[in-house]
Amino acid sequence: MSTVMSHDEHHGPAKGLSRWLFTTNHKDIGTLYLWFAFIMFMVGGAMAMVIRAELFQPGMQLVDPLFFNQMTTMHGLIMVFGAVMPAFVGLANWLVPMMIGAPDMALPRMNNWSFWILPFAGLMLISTMFMEGGGPAFGWTFYAPLSTTFAADSTDFFIFSVHLLGISSIMGAINIIATILNMRAPGMTLMKMPLFVWTWLITAFLLIAVMPVLAGAVTMMLTDRNFGTSFFDAAGGGDPVLFQHIFWFFGHPEVYIMILPAFGVVSHIIPTFARKKLFGYSSMVYAVAAIAFLSFIVWAHHMFTVGMPVAAELYYMYATVMIAVPTAVKVFNWTATMWKGSMTFETPMLWAIGFVFCFTIGGFTGLMLGVAPVDFQYHDTYFVVAHFHYVLLTGAVFAIIAAVYFWLPKWTGNMYDETLGKWHFWLSMISANVLFFPMHFSGLAGMPRRIPDYAVQFADFNMWSSIGGFVFGASQLIFLWVVIKSIRGGEKATDKVWEGAEGLEWTIPSPAPYHTFETPPEVK
Amino acid sequence: MAGKTIRRMGRLLLGLALLGGAGNALADYTLNMTQGVTEVSRDIYDMHMLVLWICIVVGIGVFGVIIYSLIKHRKSKGAQAASFHENTTIEVIWTAIPLIVLVAIAVPATKTLLAIEDTTNSDLSIKVTGLQWKWKYDYLDEGISFISALDAKSNEARARNSGIDPSSVENYLLNVDKPIVIPIKKKVRFLLTSQDVIHAWWVPDLAVKRDAIPGYINESWTRVEEPGVYRGQCAELCGKDHGFMPIVVKAVTQPEYDQWVANQKMAMAEAEASSAKTLSLGELMSKGEGLYNQYCASCHMANGAGIPGVFPGLVNSKIVTGPVADHLDIVIHGSKTNPAMAAFGLQLNDIDLAAIITYERNAWGNDTGDAVQASDVKAAR
């Protein structure tokens, strides 16, 4: 070994496919997660297009009811477990080490594994659709006994796939917690951490707490289906409602798993483009912690119609509406951050403002749904569909897109095309509202969710929603083009990228070198 | 069909053009929750409006401040960023205000909820059983029992590419072959359960939505104030035909209700008597075809082919072309291995079951030549 390799050559990425298969680099793995999430977003989106095409007008035109149910189920599962969650883990991989001044994630080899489980779990889930009897057709909430003794044989593959996705999430969460708690740069105390790091730290604890509960639920399904147990079978002394309690004990924290990191993202973008410090940093942290705590004690508000004792219904109503308090604090703080700022409206800021508006609308309908007596009319209607798409699509997904635009120059070293980015935003913002706002009305008018065909009085609202849906779906192709264009070239990004940017990730070169912060920075 | 679609799209565009201006363009839209026809449904509507208005007021406030800020505090207007980033007083105030608002919501909500859950002192009780994909009603005090399913016209129109325009079908997907009849101004208690998966019985005008869960008996109640026909649907995903199990409640005056009860009892006695008769193969086949299409075709399909991997086909199947006793057993008692095959002995009378079984054994080229009689069913029960 007489030749002395230069530092960069030695530590540069490997070439070809093996770089991606064997990588332990947090940036590579972040990229993998993000591309995987985008592909799943497109697959799940294509299923939504099938749903909206069938619902374009009354009558059954394109698909059969059983296939329609597979579409709604797979759309939900893929968007939750394949798109939103991996996208946030991808952002965490890219950003957490750079934000806390760490050279990489704490457990790099596990990081590789937790990603590479995903494509196989995802493929297995999708493959069920090609099996005899079709894929899961019982809704993403897979209530027993429809999902146990009444479901197609492919359900066992669905169960295995959920197990794998859960293992991946838990490993990802362990990695994030270990990284944040052990690898912060000297001087970065907990209360100096950027909010994205804070929200992910709390999210990771939620994941570790509830993914095993989901694993328990699907394991009980598995034994009910194959080994003669009766956990959820009333005829054998079991309890179908027990399934719902277990599922929502996972499911409610799960929805916060998908929104808390979004809060973090928005809390970076708004101060940057308002050129003003985030208002109420510590109350933002406490609000996230409060929301996370409340998320564990409100699960049965998804079950007001199952016939709980009235005392339980009252408790879940009171606890649920309490969530409005910390959530309102967050919205007020973002508003106060913009107030008397010096704002510019680059694409990430547009998405962040779109997030604040639409998420707040979803928050309002959330409050309405939390009021138990009125929930009897809203429950399982399109009003609920409108609500959770406002918080998940125009909430979580908008935040993910905002994050990509915001940090893309740091990742690729090139600015994205601002004009195309703005087209992407405005088309998405308008079409998403044309898509989801009428669903409030169809729900209030009495249209149940998860039906493949509907009475004619719901026809106009559904046609609106479908038109909005098609435009929204098509608009996302602009996003793909913008990202590819920025990878291939464009105006060179500065290190700081944005005039108002603050944080360690903006102190390193653009594009971020393969290895960063090998010597920890000093945080004052 | 295509013309209809174009007309509807035209109406949408017109609506878009007139949006905000002419209210009558939106006249045929139902934009809000129904107020319904019971005290509870009106209380719920009032609660809904209260929370909605609170949200609108808060929304106007918050969005107003944001929009003002977006317009005024922009760099292009020369705005300089202020440096404040916390203020304990204001943070305490805007944490406390939502709390007070929530208490204002919780008090009336608690009152309404307690009223909804008070099922005591009812005048009559009806047991509602969810089945894939129809409802069974048992009038516990009268001994009346029947099944209520999607009406034939909707059922025909909802087949894929049926060529029937749904808007030409009256109450498309919201009509049944036999509605449930209740007296007005009486407290009617519903006892809800299910024989297979979870369903939910929902009639918006009564503001009753309650899950029908196997192994559970849930309770709910209503007191309808005026006569009328009130329509609803199953609200919990219950499998393939979840979208096709509507509910129709006919509320009538007490004398009309008494008359209806008397008629039902008479009809049931007649059906009992007719099931002693022996029918020819032809009679059984023609009766059986209609019943098969109503009760069996949603899973086994009208052509008997089933859906591979989910619902077994009946063409040349071992059970359908094998010994009659096995066929009787699975139809009457249900499948021991697959819970999706319900015990139809609990749903249908002897003559109907005999007709269905005869039809299955002779249709689609099965041609066993067996004519199963009501007496055979009775013996096999």
Image (cartoon, coloured by chain):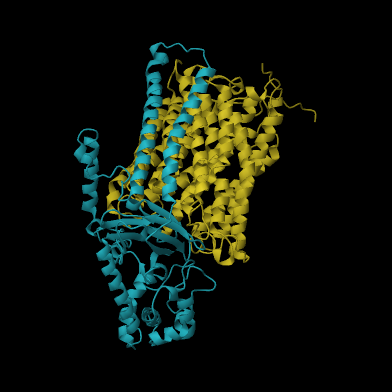
Give the chain coloured cyan.
B
Q: Most extreme residue toward the front, as rendered?
A: B121
Locate residue A46, reporting x and y percent: 43, 47
Give the residue at x 52% y 53%. A126
* Residue in the picture at 48% in, 51% down: A74
Asked if residue A28 is positioned above or below residue A122 in the image, the reply reads above
Question: Is the N terminus of chain A in the top left, top right, bottom left or bottom right quadrant?
Answer: top right
| Image-based side of A298 in relation to B160, left or right | right
Whether residue A21 is visible here, answered yes or no, is no
Look at the picture and state if A54 lies above or below B284: above
Q: Is residue B30 left or right of residue A363?
A: left
Which of the two residues, A38 or A376, is positioned nearer the viewer here?
A: A376
Residue B355: x, y in percent? 36, 81
Position of the C terminus of chain A, as image quadrant, is: top right
* x 44%, y 67%: residue: B307
The hue used for chain A is yellow
Q: How many marks?
A: 0
Q: Measuring from the top left, give residue A280's x and y in whole percent.
A: 54, 21
Task: Please say if A196 is above or below B38.
Answer: above
On the image, the x and y values in percent for residue B247 come to 34, 60
Identify the residue shown where x is 47% and y is 39%: A392
Residue B110 visible here: yes
